[in-house]
Image (cartoon, grey):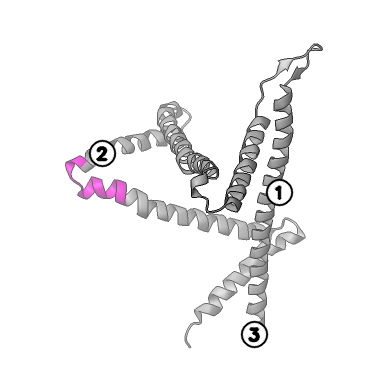
Amino acid sequence: MPINLDLITGAFAFFFTVLIFSYLLGDNPLFRIGSYIFVGVTAGYVASVAMWQVVYPRLIYPLVYGASTDKLLVFFPLLLAGFLFLKISPRTSHLGSPAMAYVVGVSAAVTVGGAVIGTILPQTWATINLFDMQTSQSWLDVIESAGNGIIILIALVATLSYFHFGARPTADGAPRRFVPIEWLAWLGRIFIAVTLGTLFAGVLLASLTALIERVSSLYLFISSFF
């Protein structure tokens, strides 16, 4: 009798979907089993990807089969990795602090550089281009483009003003920001609330889409037996 792989995968999907849905009845052992299996499979998959796409091709292979230059280049990351392993023991954890500081510093630099180059600068130029009259075809395009640019500029300035914490003491000693900054901060709260509401609606929509897909999958799996 041939093995029906679709039936087996459907049965596993049905089983784990029921385990996760059991959380509707409260925290229970079935939900915990499903969560532990999910976390374990995810950790195993990440470890496998890291092993075969990072550790082996960038560390083990150059050390075993690489030239002298390749071995010299992987010596420094290998040394840092060895220092990181020293943080397992409380007695030697201080020796791994420089390696950890290097990793955190590089990660922060990559994150900040990516945010500046990939987000801030492109959005800045895109906002500036909205005020470029030479790219517009008609007066309606000019008005529409300038209007969008003004709204984006006001939202940007108002949102940044909300995070402006400079204040001066008043006569009664209470700190108070400059009145125009206070008005812009109030307007910035509105833009922040709208943004957070939009993000929450997007997350909720994605969750409902996943829920509908799982319920539909359960229905199709059960109906396949009738």
Instruction: In this rendered view, identify the residue nearer to me: 82 or 107.
Output: 107
Q: Which residues are magenta?
A: 57-69
Disc 3 target residue: 225
Closer to the camera in the image, 213 or 116: 116
Kind of residue indicated by mark 3: Phe
| Viewer-closest of 123 and 81 | 123
Identify the disc placed on residue 197: 1
Q: Which residue does the image show at 47% across and 86% down from the upper left?
A: 2
Which numbered disc covers residue 73? 2
Q: Which three-letter amino acid code belongs to the residue tagged 1?
A: Gly
Asked if the stretch drawn in magenta spans residue 66, the answer is yes
Question: Spatial distance from mark 2 to mark 3, Cα to Cα?
Answer: 60 Å
Assign the C terminus to one quadrant of the image.
bottom right
Seen as rendered, the residue at the extreme front is: 139
Label whose residue precedes the other's in the sequence (1 or 2): 2
Percent x, y of residue 171: 80, 11
The residue lying toward the viewer, choosing from 60 and 212, is 212
Neighbourhood count class around disc 1 (C-alpha, 10 Å): few under 14, some 14–19, many 20 upward:
few
Q: Callout 3 environment at 10 Å: few (<14), some (14 to 19), or many (20+)? A: few
For this view, does 57 lie left or right of residue 117? left
Q: Position of residue 118 (x, y in %)?
A: 47, 43
Numbered disc 3: secondary structure: loop
Is the residue 83 above or below the residue 173 in the image?
Answer: below
Tell me the residue at 22%/43% (across/down). 70
Does dot 1 land on a helix, a strand or a loop? helix
